[in-house]
Image (tube, helix red, strand yellow):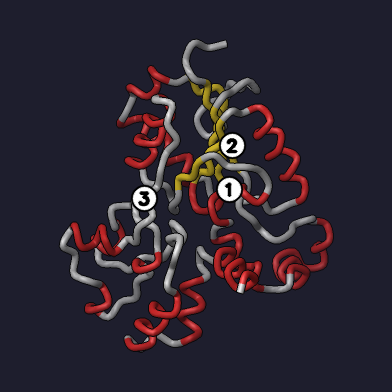
Amino acid sequence: MSPKPTVAFFEFTSCEGCQLTVVDSLQDHPELLDAIDIVQFREAMSEKSDSYQIAFIEGSCTRPSDEAKIRAIREKAAIVVALGACAHLGGINAIRNRSDMQEVREYVYGDKANWFPTYEPRPISAIIKVDAVLPGCPIDRNELVKAVTHLLQGRMPQIPDQPMCIECKLKENVCVYTQGKVCLGPITLAGCDAICPTYGDGCEGCRGTISNPNFQSLREVMLEHGVSEEEIESRLTMFMTNQILAMAKAQ
């Protein structure tokens, strides 16, 4: 057993962009490689070990066969971290949860639809207990470095439960609504340093919602700025489909 904490990275249905962000972050912070022992990371190495203490999982669960693999990771790892929007929320994959699944299969696979046992995409937390989450599409590299540092200190990464608008105000950004654009910042979890509005684009909600999102007020603001009901639904469900469906069921 390595004297350093052993870390493994896994992927399910995703673009693997969050793992590429990890690789990029480690190039800027090579000191982390001195503090941990990465034993499995298909994106960056061919060697592999099934003995690990910390598991980072990217991607959503989209097939029944994924569940056994995810549970096996949970059994081996002392700590499991959901890496990015797909693992955290179900991600863009979950958009199809608003449609009939058989119709989706037939649209994608045609007459071979029944060859592919896909089901409604869901976050990793729907299958196993997740100890921490790093949200975003992709994850924020600074947040990753901070999270790994906390884990090495024996602390769990904590994501502040505040809207992204706070970060915009701290950066003295001009609200994109005044520029004729749409932004989900009022209900979206902060932590990305408001990167999209800072560069002149509206937040798309890839980090998921704060714990008490006021969807009604946001809808009213969007309608006041000429956004159609159809576009509102499209924007809200790009990343937040599962959260919105869960809230609807709870009402």
Q: Which label's residue is closer to the chain start, 3 or 1?
A: 1
Residue 104, image x, y percentages:
71, 69
Q: Which label's residue is closer to the chain start, 3 or 2?
A: 2
Q: Residues within 10 Å of mark 3 (few under 14, many from 20)?
A: few
Q: Which residue is mark 1?
A: 59
Q: Amino acid at mark 2?
A: Phe
Q: Amino acid at mark 1?
A: Gly
Q: Amino acid at mark 3?
A: Pro
Q: Which residue is mark 3?
A: 160
Q: Which label's residue is closer to the chain start, 1 or 2?
A: 2
Q: Secondary structure at mark 1?
A: loop
Q: Secondary structure at mark 3?
A: loop
Residue 123, image x, y percentages:
60, 52
Left or right: 5 with respect to 69? left
| Depth check, front residue: 130 or 241 | 130
Specify the quadrant that holds the C terminus: bottom right
Q: Secondary structure at mark 2?
A: strand
Residue 10 badge: 2
> Relative to 212, does residue 88 appear above or below in the rendering?
above
Residue at 66% of width from left, 33% of height from top? 73
> Are dots 1 and 2 in contact, CB under 8 Å?
yes
Occupied quadrant, residue 226: bottom left
User: What separation in Å lies between label 3 and label 1 (alpha carbons)?
Assistant: 23 Å
Q: Residues within 10 Å of mark 1 (few under 14, many from 20)?
A: many
Left or right: 216 with respect to 8? left
> Relative to 220, does residue 64 appear above or below in the rendering?
above
> Are dots 3 and 2 in contact, CB under 8 Å?
no
Left or right: 181 with respect to 152? left
Q: Residues within 10 Å of mark 2 (few under 14, many from 20)?
A: some
- Which tag is nearer the camera, tag 3 or tag 1? 3
Residue farthest along the left direction in this orientation: 172
